Every structure is written in C-alpha cells, then in structure tokens.
Image (cartoon, helix red, strand yellow):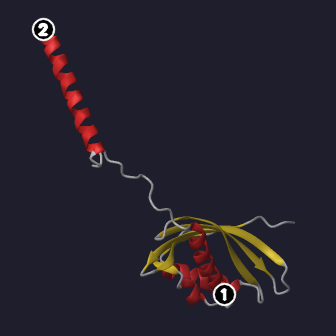
Amino acid sequence: MKKMNHLRIAVQCIAFFLLVGGFSAIAGNKPAVSTLSTEQAKPDLAKLKAEIQKIESSWAAADNARNANAIAAFYADDAISLSTNKPMLIGKAAIQKDIEESLAKRTKGSTVAYDVMDVFGDENTVTEVGKTTVKDASGKVKSTGKYMAIWEKRNGKFICVRDIYNDDVKEK
C-alpha cells in the first residue's frame, strides 16, 4: 500500500511539472532550462593574419636597415626568445644584445623576409607560425628558416612575448 502511495505521488509530481512546463511554453515564457549557447564569437583569423603580417613586414624593414633598437621595440620587456644553438634569452635587454651581435655578423647587402603562414588565437593573444628567407645582395636565397611567435595585445598593440626560431638545413 505504501508503495502505491509513493508511486501515485511521484506520478502526480511529474504530471504537475509537465503541465506547468506546457503552460509556460504556450504563454511564450522561456523554459526554465538554460539554453545558453556554447559557441562564442570566433575571431576573424584572416584579419589577424593580415595584422601580424604587417608587423612582420615592419620587422623585416627594421632588420634590413640593421636597426637593433627598432627590432627590439617589437618585444615586450618580459619577452623570452629561443633561438638556434643559444641559451634562452630572457627579457628585452638580453634579446636586444643578441640582435646587435647578430646584425654585426650579417653579410653586407643581405636581406630577410618574414612570411606569416598561419595564425590562431583571438584579438588579444595570437600565435603565429612563419618562415624566413634570407637573400644575398644579388637576390639569391642564402638560407631559409621557420619560427613561431606569441603576440599579446598590450596598450592597444600587439607585442611579441615569446618566440622560437631556427634555420633549415642548408642544401649542399
């Protein structure tokens, strides 16, 4: 007998909730169950890629002008750089010193280009994958390489907070 009372009460409760839910739907009320979308607005990656490529083109111009100060300005004060066969460079000052040493060794007339291959992230943090091409004064390709950079938007502009790069094996 007790089992029948519990069953009857359970059925009555279910019927009540279904009835109330049905009237709410008829009245145009939103259901009590959350229908929040799990999708968020997706960033415009083509726009971000173009923005990062513009920065990389400015970087190449500074690099080709042998302007260590202008190159270092692309880095955050707390940036970390990882390059081929060197210890990790921590902070803008260490990175700038390395840039100055590298520029001093660069062959006169050589140029570098940075090509953004892919980006992912959002309007505040972008990870970039790119390739480098170094040419001699005659335009002949002397070396190629690849890199990844993480850009953070600080004070309204992207600044490099991390990068890693290395050269490809030279053809013989």
Q: Where is residue 41 in the image (x, y as percent from the top left)?
A: 46, 62
Q: Which amino acid does label 2 sit on?
A: Met
Q: Residues within 10 Å of mark 1 (few under 14, many from 20)?
A: some
From the viewer's side, name the closer residue of 47 and 160.
47
Secondary structure beneath dot 1 equals helix
Please give the name of the residue rendered at 19% of the width and 28% of the height, measured from the top-left corner.
Answer: 13
- Quadrant in the picture for residue 48: bottom right
Seen in the picture, residue 122 relative to 4 is either above or below; the reply is: below
**Does residue 49 appear to the left or right of 132 in the view shown?**
left
Q: In which quarter of the image is the N terminus?
A: top left
Write down the residue under mark 2: 1
Real-space CA distance between mark 1 and mark 2, rounded to the nearest whole angstrom: 89 Å
Q: Whole-percent x and y of residue 81?
A: 55, 71
Give percent across and percent down for residue 101.
63, 83
Indicate the quadrant where residue 109 lies: bottom right
Q: Residue at x 86, y 86 (%)?
A: 138
Give coordinates of residue 45: x percent, y percent: 57, 67
From the viewer's perspective, is residue 39 above or below residue 138?
above
Q: Mark 1 points at which residue?
A: 61
Lower sequence index among marks 1 and 2: 2
Identify the amino acid type marked 1. Answer: Ala
Residue toward you, 122 or 110: 122
Q: In this rendering, would 166 be left or right of 13?
A: right
Identified at 36% across, 52% down, the residue is 36
Q: In this view, does 66 lie above or below 15?
A: below
